Every structure is written in C-alpha cells, then in structure tokens.
Amino acid sequence: MVNWRGSTNSRREDNMVTKTAAILISGALLAGCAGRQIPQTPYSPVPVANNFPTSNQYTLQATAHWAAIAQHIEQGLAADLKKSPTRPFFIAEPPPQASPFQRALSAQLVSALVRDGHVVSRTPAGSFKIDIDVQALTFAPGRTQYRYPGEPTAIAAGVLALTAIKPVAGVIAGVAAYDAYQYQHAKFDAGATPQTELLVTVSVSDQYRYYARNSSAYYVADSDRTLYGIPPEAPPESKLLKTFQVKGDR
C-alpha cells in the first residue's frame, strides 16, 4: 500500500529547500554585483565635500542696521575689556577712500561708547586705539538659499499670538494658519542669497599688544553694493565693446 500523504509532504519539503537555495544564491550574486559597481573604500584622493551645519547671518538693508552693529561692537568691547586697565578710547578718522558704511560705522561707534559712559579721546596718547577693518566680498551668483519646508496649511491656527483667534469657519482657519506661517518665517530674508558679504573686524590695542579683537560677517543687499565700497558692475552690453587705437600715416 502506497503512502501518498507521506510522498506529497516529501515533495513539498524538497520544493522549499530548492526555493530557499535559489534565493540565497540570487542574493549572493546581487551582493557581488553591487560590491563591484560601488566599491567601499576608506580612502579617497581628495576630501569629500560636506556642508557646514545650518547657521543664521543677518542681512544689512538700512542705516538702522548699521547702528545696531555699532551697539553690538560697543557691548562686546565693554565685556572683553573688563579685566584691562581703564583708559579712554580713540577711533581714528576713516581714510578718504573709506566707504559710506565704514564712515558711518566709525561715527556710530563713537556715539555708542559716549552714550554708555565711556571716555572717547580725540588724541591717541594714553588711549586704547580702536581699528575698524571692513572687507566687502563678492561670491558667485546663484548660491543655494535655505528655505523652511512646509506650506502655510501645515501650521496650526492656534500658535503664539493667534491663540485668541477662534476659527468658526474653514476660511478663518486658513487665514489664521497663513498668519502663523508668516509670523514664524518673517525672520528669513526673501529672495536669493546675496552675492555680497561683509566682514567687519574690530581691534583694540596700544603700542604693545592687542586687548580685544572680534570679527563678524553680514550679508549685504546686492543693490546696495556701492555703499560698502564695491563699484557697480558694468552693464552687459559694455562688456561686448572694445576700443582699439589705430596708428598710421596722417
């Protein structure tokens, strides 16, 4: 008498073993191919390019921002010089070729120092000398600008100052959500990343040593470049013209 049930179970077990072996062989082949296509190596002829962690940088767009910089510089100097001997400050007049920003910053820093009770001398003798160095730098156009992900509809209506709003309809809820989105993202500058950046370095020294030194970077609106000592770019059509001087018989 033939045991058909046992024979069927045996065939099923054989099929499972065959399928398992096929899967393992296929996986090994794929792994081998992937390993050949994308070699994993700890060595590279050049460093791999990485981004810096996201940071914020202010954009200067008004003379009020210049005054804020001067106030920030004054507060930093006061903190850095707490352990230094007390002396008057002296800020030299900016050179004739200084930009409008540098001249204004020098004058505003004098005002900030005097307003906070510091003595500002008109002569350098016996004083801390404050030097202000301003470098305007132009970078390539089209640099990536950070944008906060999401849409206004993703912001809830009851946020911060909008908690008093009680949406009674979908329209009101949508307006509240948009206002919340605008409120939370107002600190981001609109438009593309400016090409122009400003590096402001302030040093406090005497004839022997430096007592304080600080550098800060700012974005500058490209339309205001001339205020920071960068001449305006020539129009595109002027770059296509070239003048030649011809010498010959008269």
Image (spheres, helix red, strand yellow):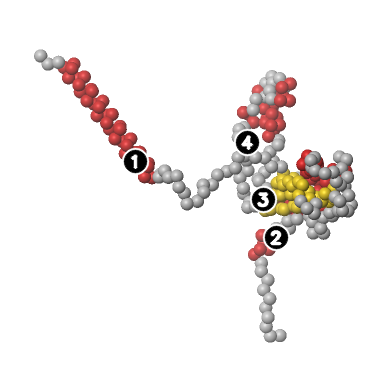
What's under tag 3, amino acid-wise? Gln
**Residue 37 in the figure: left or right of residue 187:** left
Closer to us: 178 or 206? 206
Mark 1: give few (<14), some (14-19) or many (20+) Cα within 10 Å: few
Of label 3 and label 4, which has the lower sequence position?
4
What's under tag 1, amino acid-wise? Gly
Q: Are marks 3 and 4 in contact (CB under 8 Å)?
A: no
* Quarter that holds the C terminus: bottom right
Tell me the SS state at disc 1. helix
| Mark 1 → mark 3, Cα distance in angstroms | 47 Å
Residue drawn at x 30%, y 32% is: 23
Q: Is residue 124 visible?
A: yes
Q: Which residue does the numbered mark 2 point to in the structure image?
A: 234
Q: Which residue does the numbered mark 3 point to in the structure image?
A: 195
Mark 1 vs mark 3: in front: 1
Q: Which residue does the numbered mark 1 point to in the structure image?
A: 32
Of label 1 and label 3, which has the lower sequence position?
1
42 is higher (above) or lower (below) than 237: above
77 is higher (above) or lower (below) than 171: below
What's under tag 4, amino acid-wise? Tyr
| Mark 1 → mark 4, Cα distance in angstroms | 41 Å
Image coordinates of residue 186 in percent, x first then y, are 71, 35
138 is higher (above) or lower (below) than 246: above
What's under tag 2, amino acid-wise? Ala
Name of the residue lying farthest toward the bottom: 249
Tell me the SS state at disc 4. loop
